[in-house]
Image (cartoon, grey):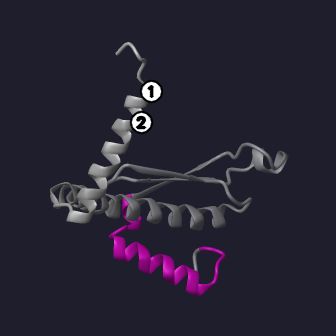
Amino acid sequence: MSPYPVSEEKNDALMRRMAELGLLESDIEETFIRGSGSGGQKVNKTSSCVQLRHKPSGIEVKCQRERSQAMNRFFARRELCDRLEERIRGARAARQQEQEKIRRQKRRRSRRQKARMLDEKRKHGEKKAARRTIGD
């Protein structure tokens, strides 16, 4: 039986994703907050907004997408997985981008590329020389 009002497939997919990321239920601190914003009296009276805090990473997620607390619990966990995955991949991506930048800086230009660059510089210099006042 699924703890969230979603299909078994979606619930299983979430549980698998949490396991892959090493996200344990015991590491998640869950609090329920009274909703706010549009939606009328029902939203403002019930504690349907879900706030999750992942203790090891310090990531906090608030979800008030639906009126149902159970659905918001599901969506908040999905959002927490997204943010955790982004942080893990983000560190790798930043390191990879830095390596690529250094590689591009060190790479030698081809003859054609160098000739094109020098030609552009020459044209730019001529353009600036044409703008000079006659007294210079």
Is 35 in front, or is 128?
128
The stretch of residues the image draws in magenta is 4-27
Left or right for 82, reference 45: left
Q: Is residue 132 left or right of residue 66?
A: left
The answer to the question of whether label 1 and label 2 lie on touching residues, with beta carbons closer than 8 A, is yes
**Crowding near the residue tagged with mark 2, few <14, some 14–19, many ≥20 C-alpha atoms within 10 Å:** few
Residue 129 vs residue 25, the one in the foreground: 129
Q: Which mark is residue 10?
A: none
Quadrant of res 81: bottom left
How packed is label 1: few (under 14 Cα within 10 Å), some, or many (20 or more)?
few
Q: Position of residue 39 (x, y in %)?
A: 81, 50
Label 1, secondary structure: give it.
helix
* Residue marked by disc 1: 131
The amino acid type found where label 1 is placed reads Arg
The vertical placement of 23 against 56, above or below, is below
Q: Where is residue 9 drawn, in percent x and y?
A: 57, 86
Work out whether residue 110 can be spotted.
no
Check the picture and name the quadrant holding the N terminus: bottom right
In the rendered image, the vertical position of residue 113 relative to residue 32, given as above or below: below
Asked if residue 114 lies in the magenta stretch, the reply is no
Q: Is residue 14 visible?
A: yes
- Looking at this view, name the residue that lies furthest to the front: 134
Within the magenta stretch, is there residue 22? yes
| Residue that carries the numbered disc 2 in the rendered image | 127
Q: At numbered mark 2, what does the secondary structure look like: helix, strand or loop?
A: helix
Between 116 and 103, the one lying in front of the other is 116
> Picture quarter containing residue 20?
bottom left
Q: Is residue 54 left or right of residue 1?
A: left
Prevailing SS of the magenta stretch: helix
The three-letter code of the residue at mark 2 reads Lys
Instruction: Tell me the distance, in whole angstroms, between the alpha carbons under discs 1 and 2.
Output: 7 Å
Determine the residue positioned at 20% across, 54% down.
Answer: 105
